[in-house]
Image (spheres, rainbow, N blue to C red):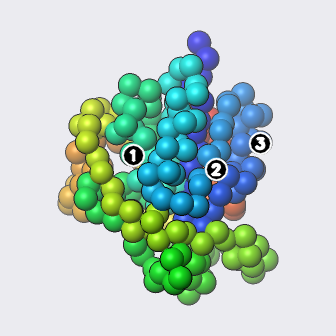
Amino acid sequence: MTAEQLVLVAGLWLDAPVWTGVVDDLTRHGRRAVPVSLPPTTLDDQLAAVLAVVDAQAGPSVVVGHSAAATLAWLAADRRPDRVSKVVLIGGFPTADGEKYADFFPVTDGVMPFPGWEPFEGPDAADLDEHARQSFAAAAVPVPEAVARGVVRLTDERRYDIPVVLVCPEFTPAQAREWIGAGALPELSRAKHVDLVDIDSGHWPMLTRPADLAAILAAL
């Protein structure tokens, strides 16, 4: 039996090339991974790009969403509960129905630019050296307002039956379990199967721990 393909969706300011190291390692593990190129237009367009990759596969897919794109992965499960076999969330949590996708930072001239490193000082960026930070900032793609402030619409409760794996980078599984139990993450609180996996990294393990992240994904 052929293992499901892994559909990789990057978070804010990132695009498909950020997954290169992870894809290379997954290939060595014998797993097929497809990074999604997200169009810089609207949230609906970005979801359509993810669904196009899912629909192009003959069998089921594991959809992997990083950071804010945890919501895109969850939206894909909501729209394709019969084709998404598992959802993997890396350092992020699904936004609830009716809320804005990622309205976290100021919007200027129709886009939400990378805000610099000050908001991420501490565990988020502790494992990024100065060169990595400069490279990240130089390659950062401004997020269109229509994406950041797009309203999330969840419609199919079969999404709660799909197994979820939460990869915990800058926070611990114990912290995540507490948040879920307290109802702070309502979509995950209602999910029927949630596994927690620790990874010793900051918020961007695909950059700082690609081999470790690939090993986690390959084992799914």
Residue type at tag 3: Asp
Q: Quadrant of the N terminus?
A: top right
Q: Say whether marks 1 and 2 touch (CB < 8 Å).
A: no
Residue type at tag 2: Ser
Classify residue 133 as left or right of residue 126: right
- Whole-Å distance between the Cαs marked 3 and 2? 17 Å
Residue type at tag 1: Trp
Q: Residue furthest top?
A: 1
- Whole-Å distance between the Cαs marked 1 and 2? 17 Å
Classify residue 15 as left or right of residue 153: right
Mark 2 residue crowding within 10 angstroms, few (<14) / some (14–19) / many (20+): some
Q: Residue furthest bottom?
A: 118
Residue positioned 72% across, 43% down in the render: 23
Name the residue that disc number 1 marks: 74
Q: Nearer the viewer, residue 156 or 186?
A: 156
- Residue 176's tag is none
Is residue 187 at least partly visible in the picture?
yes
Q: Position of residue 43 (x, y in %)?
A: 45, 56
Name the residue that disc number 3 marks: 24
Residue positioned 67% across, 52% down in the render: 16
Is residue 195 at least partly visible in the picture?
no
Mark 3 residue crowding within 10 angstroms, few (<14) / some (14–19) / many (20+): some
When asked about the image quadrant of residue 35, the answer is top right
Name the residue that disc number 2 marks: 37
In this rendering, the label closer to the viewer, 3 or 2 = 2
